[in-house]
Image (tube, coloured by chain):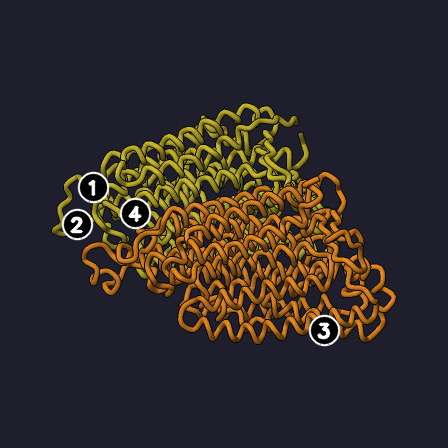
Amino acid sequence: METVHSATPLVALIASLLGALLILLTGAKRANLREFWTIAAAVTQFSLIYSMLPHILHGNVVECTIIELYTGINLQFRVDAFGMMFALLASCLWIIVSVYSIGYMRTLKEHAQTRYFFCFAMALFGATGVAMAGNLLTLYMFYEILTISTFPLVVHKETPEALRAGRKYLVYLLTGAAFVLFSMGLTYYLTGSLDFVAGGFVTGHGSRGILQLLFVTFMIGFGSKAAIMPLHEWLPSAMVAPAPVSALLHAVAVVKAGVFCCLRVILYIFGPELLVGLGLWILLAFFVSITIIMANLIALTQDNLKKRLAFSTINNLSLIILGAALLSPDGIRGAMLHISFHGFMKITLFMCAGAIYAVTRKENISEMGGIGRQMPFTMAAFAIGAAGLTGIPPVCGFISKWYLCLGTLEAGQIIFLFVIIASALLDAAYFFPLIYNAFFKKTTGETTRRKEAPMLIVAPLVATAAFSIIFCVFPDALLHFFALATKSVQTIMGVL
Amino acid sequence: MIIEQLPALIIVTPLILSLVVSVAGLWERRLCFPLVVGALTACLVCAIGILAVVMRRGEPIHYFFGGWHPPWGIEYTIDYLNALVLVGVAVISLLVTIYAKRAIEREIPDTKHPQFYTLLLLHITGLFGITATGDMFNLYVLLEVASFSAYAIIALGEQGAAFAAFRYVIFGTIGACAYLLGTGYFYILTGSLNMADLTHLLPHSFYSKALLVGFAFFIVGIGIKMGIFPLHIWLPDAYTFAPSAVSALLAPLFTKVGAYVIIRIMFTVFDPSFAIGLYPVTDVLGWIAAIGILFACMMALAQSDFKRMLCYVLVAEMGYVIIGIASANRFGLTGAILHIINDMFMMACLFTVSGAIFYQTGTRNIYRFRSLHRTMPIIFALFIVGALSVVGIPPLCGFFSKWYLILGAIQAKQWGLVVVMLLSSLLMAILFFRVIEIAYFAPPTDQVHTPHKHGNTGTVMGSVPLSMVIPMILIGIGIVLLGIFSGVIIKHIIAFAIPSTL
């Protein structure tokens, strides 16, 4: 493994920051130019990140140190295979959602669009920063930028309900951040370092009790963003935000950043060996298993489509953490793959929900009978995404869930296999009636004329649905998620 | 060599210019402002020169006034610590003074402008002196110069200012007396007032009760001046009723200089072991600060007056500095010194924002800030920068001082203080997001908009002039740069400002 020194990570981040500033300066009067900056920033960022992919696939890491903050702490980017996965995912989906956002916001004639696009770019600045951060302090910095820049998006509608959701969001996430800050301080005090090391670096520092405490505070901190129960309360409330926000941020960037950080803690700060020694992995696994089942049970009862999707997100996030907590190579690989694949599938579902709202103003599932005949493309994409989340081939969710199941067997914990299967069954239970009704339910009185959403809305969601299928048939296509996950597992398990 | 004279110049220039301003003001009022800005620019150059000299030589500068050597003469000793504080004071006072020119037009009658500028310059003279001096009694004199000009300049404010200033006079005088008594005890025990002498002489009487009493007097005296809880009660009134420009100057600087004095006395004049090992001073201070931070945050939450809320935030911020001192290790002290500088910028930012909002709308009531960001986008953007920095969001500077303070508290195994710091940043978040929510996201009410069919409140008062906005933007940029380059400051300056015994 070699270290490649390159400024590319920094330039990629600056692309989104600069994009955000240009959006702000351009303003609502020149909306087309403003939207151009969004797309330009997204494409630039993606291509810069993509340009680092060959290095990573060769097993190297790309490093970029900006400035020394204190002895042993640098403001530093260090892109490894795992970080690359998340950076690719976030920046790739940003392009797709940007297109969708433009269509959605214009169709609905939303207010404060400049603020919206500015905050969106800032949130992506935060998310890609989290992905590429080389140590905890840098990660924390972007983690906070992500939290703060998402707040205006949550309260976008400026209704009392939105403001309440925004407050809840801040209270949960900033409290989580306080826990992270504490854990970070303790880590530095114990080890004198904050740099991520595959396989962990806190081993041998501090007593067993202190390390157990450290792990718990870390998990509470990052778990609030990853919506582990009982810290999940903010996520369903935050669904009051416009659909593209829910799509990218509450299905991909924000919550995935939380999960990403949890995995960083489990695999790159503590490491599998230490966690087995501390006996904490089983505790975490049980905790997330409860979340997995509970979230899906609650999802069954939700009539609001976005809320149901939110609980499905909570379920999947915990599924990812479960995979990592099992500490078996296949479990970790499954978890990492599920970060990306779930991203593609869930974003499809949220964009479908947004498309339905944009055309019909319907938010509740009970009103959506026959909608499949009205919006066939949208609902077909929805069906693909839903099938994927349930784990049905040929959609990519099958691959990640397959490895998660293998992981449970590898770890010798059959009980978690049942958890995953039960959750898949529940997935089917709340998605399939919806799809069935959408296509086959007889509508009474209402017109069933075909009326799709505008092209800018439909094209992105069809694209992500198509990707979801491509990634199942060729898991290593285009973005090389499979290779990256394998590479990460190899470095963590030390088989390289 | 002029370089040798820098420590004197930084005091003498503003002192003489303040006299010139008061005389020139009688003749032509418009002369005052250029004179003050000229004096402060000279001070800034001096301060930077001093810092450069200290950094190049790597040892303190000693300056003997009139060539008299201690113990008879007054010595100015400038090392890394006060050189840094001097630069901070010089930068902020210059920027705020430029900001003040237009800000006072609305709040102070024209005829009193010369007095305002004179007092402003005198106050800053006092601040420079307190920071630069190496003599306990000289420090007292300059503390009183700064205090008396502060009393008077606060009394120039709106209705209620006179009474608030009077309360401040009472408290301030008690504080000054306590400080003087403390210094008296030190003098009786050692026969010297020079700080460097005291460093050598005091350890002989470390077990004397008289020294302990003197130390207690000293802490109380400075505690009142810098507004540490529970000695802060004069502060919210005085700084709220003062003219906007005055609170924008006093709030960031005077309290921080007080914090500097505490660090100087506790860790240079006294051996660090006195306040840490011999008597549990740092422990007691730490807990008082912790209670104070929580109390101040609660009080701030209860305010609807923006400036008053900021005053309580200031009290809480001073608590942070004390927590850094209380941790009594390298991390804690790094955090405390960094926070002195950072907080100068953060408080200057927030108080100037408060002044600018008042300038444009004539209100300080948070609930009347609805949709104000539309008419004053830059001011509110700066507010967000300042607010997020106080909350502790990286890469703004407030995060970094908080980070070292937390590291310090963890190293000192003061878990209670760690919890208080984390909790208080959450309270700060609630505090500031309440304002952000109202200013950005709350729907405008009829009450604000309907009475002004043609343009809302903004046009009634006139928009904020560029001469106010530009210094504010510079302060805002300062907040970001101090954050990103905090490592550089620590590595090259603060690391040498901390006593090596820690």
- The residue pinned by badge 1 equals A373
SS of the residue at dot 2?
Answer: loop
**Amino acid on which disc 4 is placed:** Ala
Q: Chain of mark 4?
A: A
Discs 2/4, front: 4
Q: Is residue A15 left or right of residue B316?
A: left
Label 4 vs label 3: CA separation?
Answer: 61 Å
Label 2 vs label 3: CA separation?
Answer: 90 Å
Residue A343 numbered mark, or none = none
The chain drawn in orange is B
Relative image position of residue A250 (x, y in whole percent): 41, 48
Front position in the image: A323 or B95: B95
Q: What color does chain A have in the rendering?
A: yellow
Residue B181 numbered mark, or none = 3
Relative image position of residue A74 (x, y in whole percent): 63, 39
Relative image position of residue B270 (x, y in whole percent): 78, 62
Front position in the image: A346 or B428: B428
Label 1 vs label 3: CA separation?
Answer: 89 Å
Residue A112 numbered mark, or none = 4
Front position in the image: B276 or B21: B21
Inspect this view and state whether residue B347 appears.
yes
- The residue pinned by badge 2 equals A443
**Amino acid on which disc 2 is placed:** Thr
Discs 4 and 3 carry the same chain letter = no
Label 1 vs label 2: CA separation?
Answer: 10 Å
Q: Chain of mark 2?
A: A
